[in-house]
């Protein structure tokens, strides 16, 4: 285990992370592209928000008065979640790739990954995109979400650490007065912190009752969190998962800390907007429209938390809200393997909606809660024992875990609203997922990747053709660009250009539009055919059409990539393989791979292509996969290069049991 000092000072890749950070907000192109993504109403709204800066500055200088709370000691029987001790003690805190010992006293304004302090000025003018000001803000924000404290509050050794939880909260309050520093710059961060505070409150209720000074400071900050969120919601083109998190924080916070008259109105507003957002941000087919597996899980966890708190407080959500949640669970049920392995397409920063145990995955928590709340035994198969979330939020339903159903063919295969199709062999051992949807959600498409017509393939319990992942957000700008690029996905690139053009780390200027042409999963040979227009912007435009045939008996693939165009173009196809795949041989027209006791062969009848395997290359960046935020590892990537003159077709076959 690394101790605090070694964590704070070690900084591999430091130069790589911090060099060349010409931040987006200082870039004229970014400004213009961001402005172009806004409608007139949003521009007016943002101008009005900017006009409030002088008032916020005055509050920062003088600190606002907070109304007296109508606080009474906690009555556990009426609190909307049940305190319990987990089955295992908590032995350390995990923050991305860093580990801290229990009892560690955080400096809340330090980036422990790169050993840097961040500025503590007025939150209204702090530029969170500038690494010179805030270092890698993700590493600064994450500990202040206090999810490590909510997890500790439900650990088997929680009782002996209740004093530490209070001490940590008190030190955070002292270090973060209202609007002072980076922890007041994002309403989502305020909301996540409020959620953690609501979850851990029962563990420290006795301390809160005894320690009047701490109670006053904490309640004042809770009120300021709630008031700030309701004034600073992420709207218009920023209304993605941030808005969902903010609304859930507002709903949960005002439900669990109902100490002020305003709480009733805040709670009602949050619930009303959540009812709206689940319909706007989740398609009728149950898929999150941000086009990112991680954010599907993140928002589902948040939606479920609000649903359970509403259920437990007598403020239930509508049947329409519940139906969208059922759809979200049904989608995960379709794309997850029998062991819970997922295709991690789109952005991911390892975010969790809430945490009651560091040892429980987002899939285990969401599917178990959904299975219990909606009486769907099939969804309970990912976790046989009760999660901390289920024991806290739906303890009356835990007995239903005894009725978990074995895996069976999922009920859906086509998700037309988000643009994904999934087909499987008859025995379910091989499955194909293909993307023919939009780049992302809202005009910014912030968390989408340039992956139109990409495919993922699972064999048995795990995905073999994989997504490269995300790796970084605010740091490592060159790697951020690679992992979002077309070359990092199992699709085709033309003339070395991305299908969609990046205008910033969370912004796209030109977006590829994909459409489904044919989906046939009724015959022995399932077929998915789709095309996109991302390369129509070229002087000599190109339309890419992909037709994938899937043998439902064997899982073998036949892929035809057609390019309708004039002129001469270089086309590249990429196939990214699981990191344990062993390439036995590669030559033009054939590559043989061994993986998990299977022999897999890529081949082509075309004789005008050049085939090579690239693993862990920095120049060009290719052959990498990121499982976790700020971590990457080499993988084998098959690249097929063909030069076409006018329209042409590239045929690729993949046999999974050769």
Image (cartoon, helix red, strand yellow):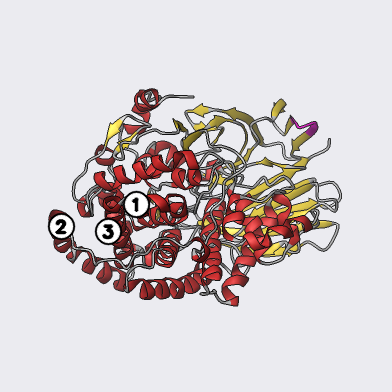
Q: Which residues are magenta?
A: 593-599
Q: Nearer the viewer, residue 78 or 517?
A: 78
Q: Quadrant of the C terminus?
A: top right
The answer to whether residue 616 is left or right of residue 588 is: left
Q: Nearer the viewer, residue 620 or 409?
A: 409
Q: Disc 1 or 3, which lies upstream in sequence?
A: 1
What is the number of callouts on the image? 3
Q: Is residue 126 visible?
A: yes
Q: Is residue 12 magenta?
A: no
Q: Residue at x 35, y 27 (%)?
A: 8
The residue tagged 1 is 210
Q: Disc 2 or 1, which lies upstream in sequence?
A: 2
- Residue 246 x, y percent position in the rendering: 40, 61
The answer to whether residue 447 is left or right of residue 458 is: left
Label 1 vs label 3: CA separation?
Answer: 17 Å
Please identify, in this view, whether the residue under mark 2 or under mark 1 is nearer the observer. 1
Question: Are circles 2 and 1 on residues that touch, CB within 8 Å?
Answer: no
Crowd around label 3: few <14 · some 14–19 · many ≥20 (10 Å): some
Q: Residue at x 26, y 38 (%)?
A: 118
Label 2 vs label 1: CA separation?
Answer: 34 Å
The residue tagged 3 is 220
- Residue 501 x, y percent position in the rendering: 43, 51
Residue 57's tag is: 2
The answer to whether residue 487 is left or right of residue 15 is: right
Question: Are circles 1 and 3 on residues that touch, CB within 8 Å?
Answer: no
Rendered view: 586 above or below 159: above
Rendered view: 88 above or below 433: above
């Amino acid at each position: 285990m690394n101790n605090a000092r070694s964590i704070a000072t070690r900084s591999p890749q430091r130069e790589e992370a911090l060099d060349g950070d010409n931040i987006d907000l200082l870039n004229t192109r970014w400004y213009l592209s961001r402005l172009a993504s806004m409608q007139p109403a949003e521009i007016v709204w943002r101008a009005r928000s900017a006009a409030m800066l002088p008032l916020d500055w005055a509050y920062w200088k003088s600190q606002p008065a907070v109304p007296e709370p109508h606080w009474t000691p906690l009555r556990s029987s009426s609190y909307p979640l049940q305190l319990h001790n987990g089955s295992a003690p908590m032995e350390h805190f995990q923050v991305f790739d860093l580990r801290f010992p229990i009892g560690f006293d955080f400096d809340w304004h330090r980036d422990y990954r790169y050993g840097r302090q961040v500025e503590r000025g007025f939150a209204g003018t702090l530029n969170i995109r500038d690494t010179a000001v805030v270092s890698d803000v993700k590493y600064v924000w994450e500990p202040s979400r206090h999810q490590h404290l909510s997890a500790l509050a439900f650990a088997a050794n929680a009782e002996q650490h209740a004093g530490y939880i209070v001490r940590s909260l008190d030190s955070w309050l002292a270090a973060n007065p209202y609007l002072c520093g980076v922890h007041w710059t994002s309403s989502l961060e305020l909301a996540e912190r409020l959620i953690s505070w609501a979850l851990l409150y029962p563990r420290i209720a006795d301390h809160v009752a005894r320690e009047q000074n701490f109670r006053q400071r904490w309640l004042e900050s809770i009120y300021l969190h709630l008031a700030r969120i309701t004034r600073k919601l992420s709207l218009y083109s920023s209304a993605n998962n941030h808005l969902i998190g903010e609304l859930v924080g507002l709903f949960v916070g005002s439900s669990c800390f109902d100490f002020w008259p305003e709480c009733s109105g805040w709670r009602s507003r949050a619930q009303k907007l959540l009812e709206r957002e689940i319909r706007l941000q989740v398609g009728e087919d149950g898929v999150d429209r941000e086009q990112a597996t991680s954010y599907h899980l993140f928002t589902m966890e948040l939606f479920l938390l609000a649903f359970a708190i509403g259920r437990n407080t007598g403020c239930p959500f509508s049947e329409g809200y519940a139906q969208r949640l059922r759809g979200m669970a049904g989608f995960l049920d379709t794309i997850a393997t029998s062991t819970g392995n997922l295709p991690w397409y789109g952005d991911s920063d390892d975010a969790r909606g809430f945490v009651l145990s560091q040892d429980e995955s987002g899939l285990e928590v969401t599917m178990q809660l959904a299975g219990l709340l909606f009486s769907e035994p099939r969804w309970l198969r990912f976790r046989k024992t009760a999660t901390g979330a289920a024991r806290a939020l739906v303890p009356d339903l835990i007995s239903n875990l005894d009725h978990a159903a074995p895996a069976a063919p999922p009920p859906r295969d086509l998700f037309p609203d988000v643009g994904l199709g999934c087909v499987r062999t008859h025995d379910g051992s091989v499955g194909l997922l293909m993307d023919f949807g939009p780049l992302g959600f809202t005009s910014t498409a912030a968390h989408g990747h340039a992956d139109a017509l990409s495919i993922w393939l699972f064999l048995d319990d795990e995905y073999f053709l994989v997504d490269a992942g995300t790796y970084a957000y605010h740091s490592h700008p060159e790697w951020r660009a690679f992992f979002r690029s077309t070359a990092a996905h199992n699709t085709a690139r033309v003339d070395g250009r991305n299908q969609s053009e990046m205008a910033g780390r969370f912004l796209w200027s030109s977006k590829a539009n994909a459409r489904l042409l044919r989906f046939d999963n009724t015959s022995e040979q399932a077929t998915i055919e789709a095309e996109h227009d991302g390369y129509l912007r070229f002087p000599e435009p190109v339309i890419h059409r992909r037709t994938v045939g899937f043998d439902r008996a064997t899982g073998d693939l036949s892929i035809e990539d057609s390019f309708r165009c004039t002129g001469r173009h270089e086309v590249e196809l990429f196939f990214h393989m699981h990191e344990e795949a062993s390439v036995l041989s590669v030559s033009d027209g054939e590559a043989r791979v061994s993986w998990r006791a299977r022999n897999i062969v890529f081949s082509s009848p075309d004789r005008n292509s050049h085939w090579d395997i690239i693993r862990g290359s920095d120049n060009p960046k290719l052959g990498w996969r990121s499982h976790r935020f700020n971590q990457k590892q080499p993988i084998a990537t098959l690249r097929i290069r063909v030069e076409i003159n006018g329209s042409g077709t590239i045929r690729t076959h993949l046999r999974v049991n050769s």
